Structures are given as structure tokens and as C-alpha cells.
Image: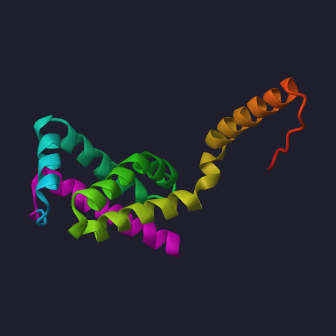
Amino acid sequence: MILTISRIVLGAILLLTGSNKFFGFFSMPAMSPDGMQFLGALAETGYMIPMIAIVEVLCGLMLFSKATTPLAALLLAPLTVNILAFHLFLAPTTLLLGGLVFLLNLYIGGKHFSYYRSIFAKIFTERVLITEKKAQATNRPVAVVN
């Protein structure tokens, strides 16, 4: 139940904010000069704001479907980290929304961690193998924690 509500709330936020970048339904809240300068720099590239908007809209729509939620959460991970960092460092007056988006994606991704386990298993397996080889080279026992 909480997962479903989280998916719908995050999907709605992303769909609304992504669509707003294209159509401008509502104005941006007041923010620091640094925040405005950063957003201006993104807009000057000519592609960053539309690309961010497309990712937000597509992932927002994907969150409305249970089948595509794990992929949406994975695709959103770098975006939500940057949203949180932007609000934390450049627009602290709007930190509530940035924090909410980050926490919702973190919760949704955590609930779907079984889908990502194989990605992390290879990383951790290689690290354990490297540690074991170093231990064998120095003739020291190694403790492996599962």
C-alpha cells in the first residue's frame, strides 16, 4: 500500500515538473542567485532542460505501472541525487520538494533491490576475489562476510 502511494506520488510529481519544463503551467519559486545562475547555464546548453524534462516525464509515467517501476527507479537515481544536491546547496527554500523526491525514489528503489542484486553481486564478488588473492600472496587468512 505504501509502495503504491509512493509510486503514484513520485510519478505525479515528476510528470508535473517535467511537463512544466515544456509548457510552463506554474512559475518557478524564488531562489538564490546561484540557483538561478545554475539553471540559466543548463538552459543555455539548449538540450539539458529538455532532456531532464523528458526523463522526468517518461519515468513519471513508468512509475504508474508496477512492471516498469524498478527500471524507472534505477533511471531516476542519478537525477534524484542531483535534484537533492541542487535544492540542498543552491535552493534551500525549496528543499522539501527535492528531499521528498529523493526519499521517495530511495524507498522505491530499496523495495525493488532484488531487481538490482545481480548488478551489485558482480562488484562485490570481484572485490572479494581481489581481497582473497592479496591474502594468499601475503599468506594471511582472509575473513569474508556474507
Colour convention: rainbow
In the image, residue 134 sits, relative to residue 19, either above or below, namely above
Q: Is residue 126 magenta?
A: no
Position of residue 16 measured from the top left corner of the image (x, y, whole percent):
23, 61
Residue lying at 74% horizontally and 29% vertically, measured from the top left:
130
The answer to whether 82 appears left or right of 34 in the picture is: right
Residue lying at 30% horizontally and 51% vertically, measured from the top left:
56
The residue range painted magenta reads 1-27
The answer to whether 120 appears left or right of 131 in the picture is: left
Secondary structure character of the magenta stretch overall: helix
Viewer-proximal residue among 66 and 109: 109
Viewer-proximal residue among 94 and 2: 94
Position of residue 1 measured from the top left corner of the image (x, y, whole percent):
53, 76
Query: Which residue ends up furthest to the top in the rendered image?
Result: 137
Residue lying at 44% horizontally and 69% vertically, measured from the top left:
6
Residue lying at 65% horizontally and 36% vertically, measured from the top left:
123
Position of residue 37 measured from the top left corner of the image (x, y, whole percent):
12, 48
Position of residue 71 measured from the top left corner of the image (x, y, whole percent):
48, 47
